[in-house]
Image (spheres, rainbow, N blue to C red):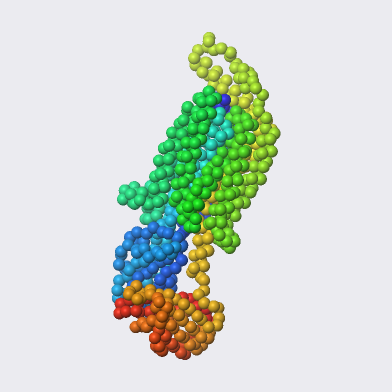
Amino acid sequence: MTATAPHPGASPIRRPFTAAALAAALVSLVFGLLLAGAGPASAHAALTGSDPQDGAVVATAPKEVTLTFSEAIAVGDGSIRVLDPSSKRADTGAEPKDLSDGSTVRYGVELHSGLPDGTYTVAWKAISADSHPISGAFTFSIGAPSETTVALPSEEVGGGPVGTVYGIARYAAYAGFTLLVGGAAFVLGCWPRGASVRPVQRLVVRGWVTLTAATLVMLLLRNPYTGSGKFADAFDLDGLQAVLDTKPGAALVSRLLLLGAAALFIAVLFGTYARREDAVEKKDLTFGLAVGGGVVAAGIAATWAMSEHASTGIQAGIAMPVDVLHLLAVAAWLGGLVALLVALYRTPDIGSDAVRRFSRVAFGSVLVLAATGIYQSWRQVGSWSALTGTRYGQLLILKVALIAVMLAVAWFSRRWTGRLTDAAPGEAGKDDEAADPVGTAGDVDPARAAQLARQQAVLTATKKKRIRDADPERSGLRRSVLAEAAIAVVLLAVTTVLTSTEPGRTEVEAKGASTAPSAPAAGPVNLSMPFDTGGRNGKGTVRIDIDPGRTGSNELHVWVDGSDGKPMDVPELKVALTLEAQEIGPLPVVPDRLAEGHWSASGVQIPMAGEWKLDVTVRTSDIDQVTIDKNVKIG
């Protein structure tokens, strides 16, 4: 039977600090700490290269600026802007061109012709394939560096108050999904009588309301979150339409539609199912609700899988269904745990059979979590260095540690479950009889009868609570489950932060692409650099030898081969050396033509050891030329 709450003014009994209050306080504390220390969402796609490179000094103005990313991105007008030293647009303003080839993701913008010498700023912003906004800026110089008046926003895209509210909505969405799915699964799979228990009903309904409200907030804030950062743009209809045309927007709308089906599921679960008395009919309805509810739950989980980490990177076709299983297992375990905690604290009706059934469900969920988690960890981390040397890897270690602690506490819960016994039949009836102080109220006026009924309800609830709290096994189980739930709140928060953190594999690859040396540390330098001027017969390879590859005088030889591998003569070839760390250069080198496709320069002075940037400009016609570069170690 459902425990009846005392009338607010009927009894001076003060209830102790409840599980719900403790959970709410813990949620506030954890999320507050996370949000206080969190900046904008970390980039999931990363800039791995550019042409010209960051800090490069090129002899002549390039025709375009290209940016290379670690994974697919979405760009639009103004996503890549090139600003001259006076802060005016140096690019043509057209939408970036998609120059991607195979697994290489590259975008470029054309520049105006006749750009003057000086330092230029490239500012870019985009949406990574896993729905998170990314942005950045770098500079390059034409001829020689100069002062620049460009003032870029200090706040990254996805930050500010809008980013904070969007982040809270993300946390709330995961929590709501966990309570909705886990609570409903607990009722159907472990405790069917819980469908008529008011505290459990409220838990599941609140999970639905939280998830629905958070999804609506994320949909409205999606445009300012990825763009202006202003709350007023949440109601910009053009911006909202643009959001609906994106993968994250489609996922949020799909989630809202599925939540409509979930509302119908809840109505049947706590209405028709709770009132059904016939065992056969209830069994058939249980099967139907389990199938229908499972489909809806998997669909809601898929809205995350199709728009976040799992949808991009390697093996996306496998990763998305694995992610759905992972989310469902999390919800069944953690959401069911909260439902069990509410049942243990708010009603004496739950029996040992229900607790044991949940124990088996939790064990199965942990097995699924282990299998899917190992795969996800390999996919998102990929190496020990990424596990220990990136924020994503460190958060993953923390998550594993929390799961280990939670499993240890769960072991104690299983021990209490083994000792748990149900109340003897008829005890509740005796309590009800003992709590009836008037017998029949036939001769009492209605007001007096209502007052006596309230008193009886208070006494009945108090006696049941006393009996429930006097059971040492049940009290021990409540404490251990409360500890599990507390750890689960922190675990859910860490998991949510993981979804807004750049995967370790991507971060390591991006760092490697930007810092990997292109030549041996010492001795003669041998380089091979492909080029493409964009014109007819404009593809080929430049091979360079620098001997002895040390400070002082060096011999430089350059060979140019066409796409067919044969020597290729070009109208113009220029070489320059820059030591960016010491702000030396560019030092121009004008080699002489020795033979077809072969140029040479002697006495090339390299004044200091270090990592030099070697720029080679190749012109294949009157209008087609390109500058390519590589870093070389001169010792």
Q: Where is residue 189 shown, x and y percent of the image?
A: 56, 34
Q: Is residue 503 above or below residue 50?
A: above
Which image quadrant is residue 112 in? bottom left
User: Who is closer to the viewer here, 241 or 223?
Assistant: 241
User: Residue at image x 52%, y 16%?
Assistant: 449
Q: Residue placed farthest to the top in the image? A: 443
Q: How many marks?
A: 0
User: Who is closer to the viewer here, 16 or 463?
Assistant: 463
User: Residue at image x 34%, y 83%?
Assistant: 571
Q: Is residue 28 visible?
A: no
Q: Quadrant of the C terminus?
A: bottom right
Left or right, residue 379 beside residue 84: right
Q: Is residue 241 above or below residue 631?
A: above
Left or right, residue 500 beside residue 119: right
Q: Quadrant of the N terminus?
A: top right
Q: Where is residue 205 shown, x and y percent of the image?
A: 48, 35
Left or right, residue 430 beside residue 281: right
Q: Where is residue 210 shown, x and y percent of the image?
A: 46, 40
User: Residue at image x 34%, y 79%?
Assistant: 620
Q: Is residue 13 above or below residue 410?
A: above
Q: Is residue 182 visible?
A: yes
Q: Where is residue 483 shown, x and y percent of the image?
A: 62, 42
User: Residue at image x 45%, y 54%?
Assistant: 130
User: Who is closer to the viewer here, 407 or 299?
Assistant: 299
